[in-house]
Image (tube, rainbow, N blue to C red):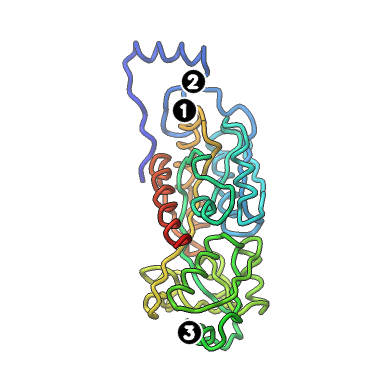
Amino acid sequence: MSTPVTARRSAAVVAVASLAVALSGCASREGGGGAAEGSDFPDGSITLYTPTAAGGATDLTARTLGAELEDDLGVSVVVENRPGASGSVGMQFLAGQDPDGYSIAVLPVEVSMLQYQDFDVDPADYDFLGQVNAQPGTIAVPADSPYQTLEDLVTAAQEDPGTLSISTAGAGSIWDAGVSALSQAADIDVQAVPFDGGAPAVTAAIGGQVDAVIAGIGETAPANADGRLRVLAVFTEEPAPALDGVPTAIEQGYDVQIGSWAVIAAPTGLPDDVRDTLESAIATAVEAPTYVELIESGGNIVTYRDADEASEFVDEESTRFAELLTS
């Protein structure tokens, strides 16, 4: 796992830079956590937004990382939910905040795809500070469902087009895109039923309100383990250890590979010293045992990319979703 690199300067350059900091508020990069040398940031509470409802994977990620960031930064980190419209409400809110480091957010994969679904969300509006996890996608049915395999579900959808219902985290969400990906791969017509977040979408499937749910493994694996849901397939290339015995969609003849991930972001235009301080604190937070345990216990993957790598990754994902969602 890489960490931010500390710039090395001569004593004379450091002296000049220190004077510049005093005059302009700019600071040089310092790795290893905490505020960058010469910077007053942070000197007050930070709000860590999540554009999702409470109880879902992104919300839990934000709350656990927030606690770790508090320890490293030495200030209060308050988590605030701003759900709505597949996360676009919270993302638009973040983009409109001052780029001072006191408003940051855990943003899910939808930040790279909503622009292709008529939402006013543009990745260019954010400074990405680091990727913090990855979450494989799954499809599951209620425990008493007649569908024992993905093939059973596909066959039912083919026999009665347009009637089989699949709940998702919302129109425009990654799991809504998962419905499109499955529909294309299996040549079926199904109803995508949007909910405001992954947790209520899974709850709807558990309660039998829909025929199936497409959601992250962190939201379906626990319900699969205690018998409330039956996961039919994992949307990854290889089987998932958290769902022992559950085949991939690829193994069942349907080439569907889709999953979620999360990055921490701020409104674009952060000062360099603020960006470096937050990036360093995030790199430390993702290694914390409490965070690693949270992510891995749900079958997810602790996946860290630094600020530059995360920005490049979001660009690559945006290109991929442009092909999937506009074809």
Q: Is residue 27 above or below residue 241?
A: above
Query: What amino acid is labelled 1 in the image?
Result: Asp
| Total number of numbered discs in the rendering | 3
Q: CA distance from mark 3 to mark 2?
A: 58 Å
Of labels 1 and 3, earlier in sequence is 3
Q: Residue at x 44, y 78 (%)?
A: 186
Helix, strand or loop at label 3? It is loop
Of labels 1 and 2, earlier in sequence is 2
Residue 108 image position (x, y, % from top left):
53, 53
Helix, strand or loop at label 2? It is loop
Residue 175 image position (x, y, % from top left):
53, 65
Q: Going by the image, does 174 lie left or right of 7?
A: right
Q: Which residue is mark 1?
A: 272
Q: Quadrant of the C terminus?
A: bottom left
Proximity of marks 1 and 3: CB atoms separated by less than 8 Å: no
Q: CA distance from mark 1 to mark 3?
A: 51 Å
**Residue 290, can we see it?**
no
Q: Which residue is mark 3?
A: 149
Residue 96 image position (x, y, % from top left):
62, 37
Query: What amino acid is labelled 3 in the image?
Result: Thr
